[in-house]
Image (cartoon, coloured by chain):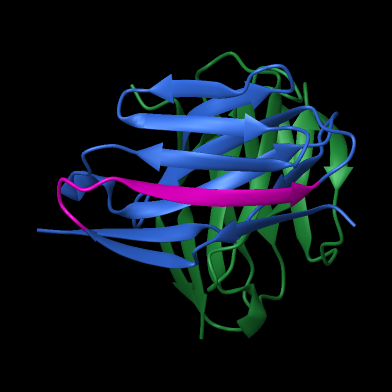
């Protein structure tokens, strides 16, 4: 069973469109995250949720809106996509805020 | 400013050889240091987590060291295999919800 799963794995879309990426973890963890990995492979945190509550919201355009319907799910909705949004987005979870991170396989977003 | 720097940026070694990757950090306060392996097209996977009091930790052929005084860590890979080809990312935790990521070292193990 996949511990942290995210869909879709690949997403190609036009500028200006709205898209969502879904994430689910079956590890029973309390904390979930969204990370963005740019072309230089640098991972940068976007959001962190603990038990459905937003904990961290880094400097991310408000076109990005995370939603956590329950502590096992953290979805990412992106409005009005721009070319610069092209990246690989990783969902992750951890038992505690300082614990080991378990990453999903990533969702590669390409904005044309 | 909290920073994690890794060297070398990339490395090519022959299968069966050993190698050492370096991580220098200026992160405060310090909670723990992690090494992750990221295969191409996959998510990062944890190799080790080390706290302040630990100065060495092994995971199979991977051995991480930590010198908290000089704020340096290394990841030593013994008897490399083709499957070790990946990016290795050093991450330092500065406490609650605060992780500082390095830019990674890309390792290619050549047959």
Chain B drawn in what color? blue
The residue at the far left in this view is: B111
Horizontal relation, residue B24 to residue B75: left or right? right
Q: Quadrant of the C terminus of chain B?
A: bottom left
Q: Quadrant of the N terminus of chain B?
A: bottom right
Above or below, B55 against A20 in this view is above
Q: Which residues are magenta?
A: B14-26
Q: Nearer the viewer, residue B38 or B84?
A: B84
Q: Residue, x 61% and y 40% (percent of image)?
A: B73
Horizontal relation, residue B90 to residue B44: left or right? right
The residue at the far front in this view is: B70
The residue at the far top in this view is: A28
Above or below, A49 against A72 in this view is below
Chain A drawn in what color? green
Work out whether residue A8 can be spotted: no
Where residue B3 appears, as percent x and y from the top left, is 78, 55
Instruction: Look at the magenta stretch and give its main secondary structure.
Output: strand
Q: Nearer the viewer, residue B47 or B60?
A: B60
Q: Residue, x 61% and y 49% (percent of image)?
A: B23
Q: Residue, x 62% and y 24% (percent of image)?
A: B50
Q: Is residue B73 magenta?
A: no
């Amino acid at each position: 069973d996949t511990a942290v799963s995210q869909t879709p794995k690949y997403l190609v879309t036009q500028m200006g469109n709205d898209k969502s990426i879904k994430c689910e973890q079956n590890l029973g963890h309390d904390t979930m995250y969204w990370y963005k990995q740019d072309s230089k492979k640098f991972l940068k945190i976007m959001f962190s949720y603990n038990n459905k509550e937003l904990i961290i919201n880094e400097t991310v355009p408000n076109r990005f809106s995370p939603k956590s319907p329950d502590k096992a799910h953290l979805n990412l909705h992106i409005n009005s996509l721009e070319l610069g949004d092209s990246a690989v987005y990783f969902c992750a979870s951890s038992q505690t805020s300082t614990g080991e991170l378990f990453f999903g396989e990533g969702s590669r977003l390409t904005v044309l | 400013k909290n920073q994690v720097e890794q060297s070398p940026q990339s490395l090519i070694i022959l299968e069966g050889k050993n190698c050492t990757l370096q991580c220098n950090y200026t992160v405060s306060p310090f909670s723990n240091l992690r090494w992750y392996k990221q295969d191409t097209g996959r998510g990062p996977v944890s190799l080790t987590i080390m706290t302040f009091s630990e100065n060495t930790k092994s995971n199979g052929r991977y051995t991480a060291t930590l010198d908290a005084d000089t704020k340096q860590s290394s990841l030593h890979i013994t008897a490399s295999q083709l499957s070790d080809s990946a990016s290795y990312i050093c991450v330092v935790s500065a406490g609650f919800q605060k992780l500082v990521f390095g830019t990674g070292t890309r390792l290619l193990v050549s047959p």
